[in-house]
Image (cartoon, rainbow, N blue to C red):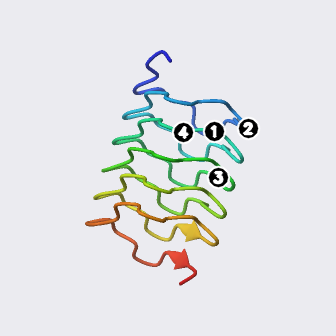
Amino acid sequence: MQSLSYLAVFGMSLEGAQLQGADLCGADLRGVKLKGADLRGARLIGADLTRADLSGADLRPLAISDGRFIRTDLTRARLRNADCRDARLTRARMLDTDTLAARLDGADLTGAEREL
């Protein structure tokens, strides 16, 4: 897939989008609706997904280290084997989120709503 690095599409609806393997490093995706999107193998390093809706999205395996997911809805998202090192997941909603084998070391989960 073509590089979409540093793309700015804040607030847009991309529900169900097929973005497998997309390079979205540094992209401004604030408030974007990616509900049910297929982002398998995508790269979101340094991307800003503040207040984005990723509920039900397939994010495995995903490289999101150093990304911003502040107040992002990750309900029922699949983050299995995702690289979330140093990601900012402050106040993210992570209910029924599959994080099996995900790398969360150094991630900021302050105030995140999670099921244990």
User: Marks 1 and 4: in contact by CB < 8 Å?
Assistant: yes
Question: Tag count in the figure?
Answer: 4
- Residue bearing the label numbered 2: 16
State the residue at coordinates (67%, 41%): 37
Circle on res. 38: 1
- In the picture, measured across the screen, residue 50 lies left or right of residue 6, that is right
First of labels 3, 2 by sequence position: 2
> What's the residue type where badge 3 is placed?
Asp
- The spot of residue 46 in percent (x, y) is 34, 42
Q: Nearer the viewer, mark 1 or mark 3?
A: 1
Q: Nearer the viewer, mark 2 or mark 4?
A: 4
> What's the residue type where badge 1 is placed?
Asp
Secondary structure at badge 3 equals loop
Q: Is residue 108 above or below residue 116?
A: above
State the residue at coordinates (59%, 60%): 74
User: Marks 3 and 4: in contact by CB < 8 Å?
Assistant: no
- The spot of residue 14 in percent (x, y) is 69, 35
User: Marks 2 and 3: in contact by CB < 8 Å?
Assistant: no
Q: Nearer the viewer, mark 3 or mark 2?
A: 2
